[in-house]
Image (spheres, rainbow, N blue to C red):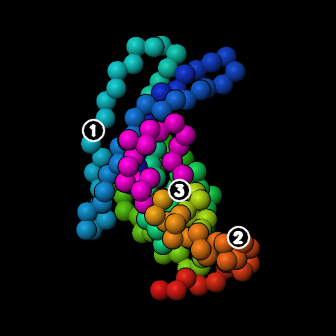
Amino acid sequence: MLAVWQKVYATLTDDSSYFLDAVEVLTDKDGKFLIPKFSAFNINPIARIEGPTFMIYKPVYAVFPGFGAQYFDKYFPENLKVDTYTLAELFKRGISLEFPRLRTWIERIDSHYWASPAYGIPEAKIPNFKRILSEEEKYLEPIKSKYRYDKEKLNIPIDR
């Protein structure tokens, strides 16, 4: 599980955000996790701190939500489709999510694709997350090469 905070600067045309901090957290045997309290000092009046945004990734399960929110949404009821700020508040209160197991190779490949962490996070902050992504990439490469990323051909059940 990955939690990321950003510093956001207001400009005349739009906001610009930059990486501030990230925390990797492993789940316990029941799938629960606790993020350490985060505090940052900001004296810049045109900047604010946003976050955390979350990404939860485990191969063979749908990635949550990262840049793949649209992908994740297809598995969950309408009442769980919320914006990032609402989601952060729900996590603070201790919600439970059940992650659907991916059934086809194309789902697994797409889930891996959407699990990319936000740009600008130093690898030293997320070594386990990067290791899991790298291992999954190596695992998926033979099947992707075999079917040349043909979505129809990859829409086959994952051998269990």
Image location (x, y in percent) of residue 103: 55, 80
- At 48% from the left edge and 72% from the top edge, which residue is drawn? 60
Label 3 or label 1, whichever comes before in sequence order: 1
Residue under circle 1? Answer: 37
Which residue, given by chain and number where applicable, does mark 3 sit on?
115
Label 3–label 1 contact, CB within 8 A: no
Secondary structure of the residue carrying numbered label 3: loop
How many numbered dots are placed on residues in this image? 3
Task: From the image, state whether disc 2 or disc 3 is nearer to you.
Answer: 2
Residue 40 picture quarter: top left
Q: Earlier in the sequence, mark 2 or mark 1?
A: 1
Frontmost residue, 50 versus 115: 115
10 Å crowding of disc 2: few (<14), some (14-19), many (20+): some
Q: Position of residue 53 (x, y in %)?
A: 46, 44
Q: Amino acid at mark 2?
A: Tyr
Cα–Cα span, label 2 and label 3: 18 Å
Q: Nearer the viewer, mark 3 or mark 1?
A: 3
Please tell me whether residue 98 is drawn above or below residue 32 in the rendered image.
below
Residue at the image position 38 percent from the left and 41 percent from the top: 124
Q: Nearer the viewer, residue 138 or 92?
A: 138
Q: Which residues are magenta?
A: 115-132
Label 2 SS: loop
The residue tagged 2 is 149
Type of the residue with mark 1: Lys
Classify residue 125 as left or right of residue 6: left
- Is residue 129 magenta-colored? yes
With respect to residue 141, does 156 lie above or below? below
Q: CA distance from mark 2 to mark 1?
A: 42 Å
Q: Is residue 33 magenta?
A: no
37 left or right, relative to 123: left
Q: Earlier in the sequence, mark 2 or mark 3?
A: 3
